[in-house]
Amino acid sequence: MESEFGEKLARLFGQLSKQHSVPHHFDDTFFDKLLDYLPSDDQTNRAIAAFVDRVTTADACNLLVVRLCLRLCGYLVQKNSSIVDRLPMEELLSKSQLVMHHDPGAREAFFNTSTHLLVARQRVHNPTTQLALKSLRDAGESVFVRKSAQQYLSAYLRATNDHTTKDHTTESALFDQLMQLPESAVLINSAAAAVVEGGVGVPQQMCESFVRVARTRRRAVGDAYWRLTANAISRMGAEEAQHRLLRDASGWANELGRLAVLKHFLLLSRSTSGVVSQTTIDLLLQAVPSPSAIFHLTDVVSILENHQLLFVVNKLIEKFAAAENAPVMGLTKFVSQLPASVFADNGLDINSLLKVVRRHCWAAPDLLRIVIESTPFARIKTSLLELDSLVSIAVAKLDDPEWEVRDSALEVLTHISEAYRRSDDGIAAVPTDLSAIVGKVTSLALNDPSHFARASAVRLLESVDPAQALPTALQIATDDSDPLPRRAAVHLMRSQCAHSESASSIGATLPRLALDTDVEVLIATIELCTLLIEHRHEADKALAFLIEMIQDTDVTLAALDALKKLTIDGRLSGDMLSTIDEAEMFRKRELNRDHYAVQPDSLLDDMFAALCKDDSVDDDENMKDCY
């Protein structure tokens, strides 16, 4: 039985096929909506087929109608409709060429339809290949048309490369034309990928052609391009010939590209043969301390065996020990990726590693933190002299006029203090030089012009002697003008809330902390209050703070979650529970969670509502927080 929609669709197509002009508003927007609502049934397919037949056989037809025909055919191909095999697709594509020269939208639909036919039906329309190349060569062509042309060429090359026994003459000629495109034609990369990754049937001369062009490429290109180059090299001749290509630095116009190729060649050798090429590792190491070489080494950490990792780390230590200006950010990233087994292995020269750290950690204190946290303290003990000398250097830098130097020195001292705290002797093992500068660090925490340095000083005080530093932290938490030191101070207070004497001082500070305008400080204080209640210290004051925070829309949910957890865990006494309405608390919590979590776009709605709100209207119901 014919549906009403199908009948209307057939009438619409029939009317369109007779018109030499269509209304101006009948554009791609209309097509988009039509394709969205088309049902996948035989009646619709028959209507489309009849429409395509009429347009194809008509003497003349409107450009928009031809474009709609192309898009409908692409739709049928995507739906895998068997009716496509009965459509006069070659005739439609040929007719499209006559009318699409002045319409980018028609050209885009033309290439997209051709691509769909290739992918789903392996049907090739030969003139499309040259038209696609023409679009790619035309610098003034629309980016959307260029993209659709590139997708067609990729599909064409992939489809033809699926057959390993056929003649590659046509594909080789096409590839040579692709290689001659201007370097600014970035869409070449995906088409080249179709050749290089097309399977074992890709002839060697095509790979050689690609590598020849890649080696002369000077401009920066994406990492994917160099991955393709490595793939092509791996298909060229014997392994020694491949390594000769990679080793020849003078033959590459782009040294950074060669290093990227080395990385991908390593990854490829592991995935294909299961063995990582030691020759390629040596070539990458030769380029150190180039930042690019170090970052590429970081990318291959996961595929190296433990003995290879040790070899690479010790080589890096050797090179960095002699380098004046080393890319320590790259070294830091590399070290952070190393497994714990490397740091525990006696084959690692830990003493030399710490010497490198001592030399370069001022530019990247995280390098020291990673090494200290990753290395068993039993191994660090053998190099305490290195740490002690580092302390002396860092202490001297606390008086440097540059705040960045003071901040790095404070971070280094904090990491060293943490290392000593991990020892069997605990805090008693902190070196004398570090214990003797508490007064200096306290002064920096209170008075340093840089808020970064003040926050770092608070963290160092927490690591060395948090009990002694508590009065300083209380003062900073309430008086410092910047939130960063205040956050560090609240963190220090949390470490002391288990002690009744300290808790009394902390509780007295809570009313002033409730006035803080920084959300992170308030959330940290909520966590502090939760700990106070759990330890039964200053619980009434902590509960009063949590209840007050429910009214602060920035941290309402955090305060409600804390109260719910305390209630469920039985941490609130009967007297404390009497001060809050549990039912109302849980109702507010769910309302807030619904507003922030269930409706993720509600925040944007609030922001728009706030922008559009009439200032003369005072509507409390709409006064919501836009954060």
Image (spheres, helix red, strand yellow):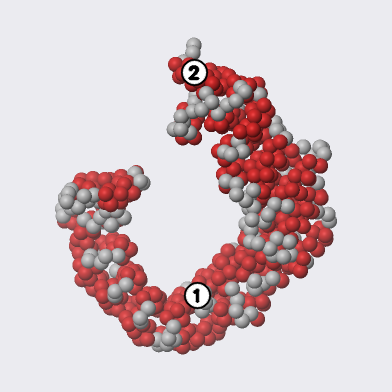
Cα distance in 3D space between marks 1 and 2: 74 Å
At a point 49% along the width and 11% down the height, the residue shown is 1
Question: Residue 348: x percent and y percent?
Answer: 64, 72
Q: Is residue 533 above or below residue 87?
A: below
Q: Mark 2 points at which residue?
A: 11
Is 610 on the left or on the right of 465, as rendered?
left
Asked if the residues shown at circle 1 and circle 2 are in contact, with their CB atoms under 8 angstroms apart, the answer is no
Q: Measured from the top left, where is residue 603 in percent x and y?
A: 32, 49
Residue beneath the point at 64% across and 71% down: 290
Question: Could you tell me the amino acid type at mark 1?
Answer: Pro
Q: Which numbered disc flags the more N-terminal residue, 1 or 2?
A: 2
Which secondary structure lies at badge 2?
helix
Say above or below: 466 vs 117: below
Q: How many labels does the image show?
A: 2
| Residue occupying image coordinates x 64% and y 58% | 221
Q: In this view, does 233 lie to the left or right of 521?
A: right
* Residue 239 placement, left or right of 504: right
Q: What residue type is labelled 2?
A: Arg
Indicate the quadrant where residue 500 lies. bottom left
Q: Nearer the viewer, residue 606 or 133?
A: 133
Residue 231: mark in rendering: none
Badge 1: few (under 14), some or many (20 or more) residues near its Cα, within 10 Å? many
Q: In the image, which is nearer the foreground, mark 1 or mark 2?
A: 2
> In this rendering, does residue 584 appear at all?
no
| Residue 480 on image: x %, y % | 29, 75
Does residue 544 appear in the picture of this structure? Answer: yes
Instruction: State the residue in front, 16 or 314.
Output: 16
According to the picture, the residue beneath numbered tag 1 turns out to be: 365
- Residue positioned 61% across, 33% down in the render: 99
Instruction: Please name whichever residue, 503 or 16, is drawn nearer the observer in this view of the structure.
Output: 16
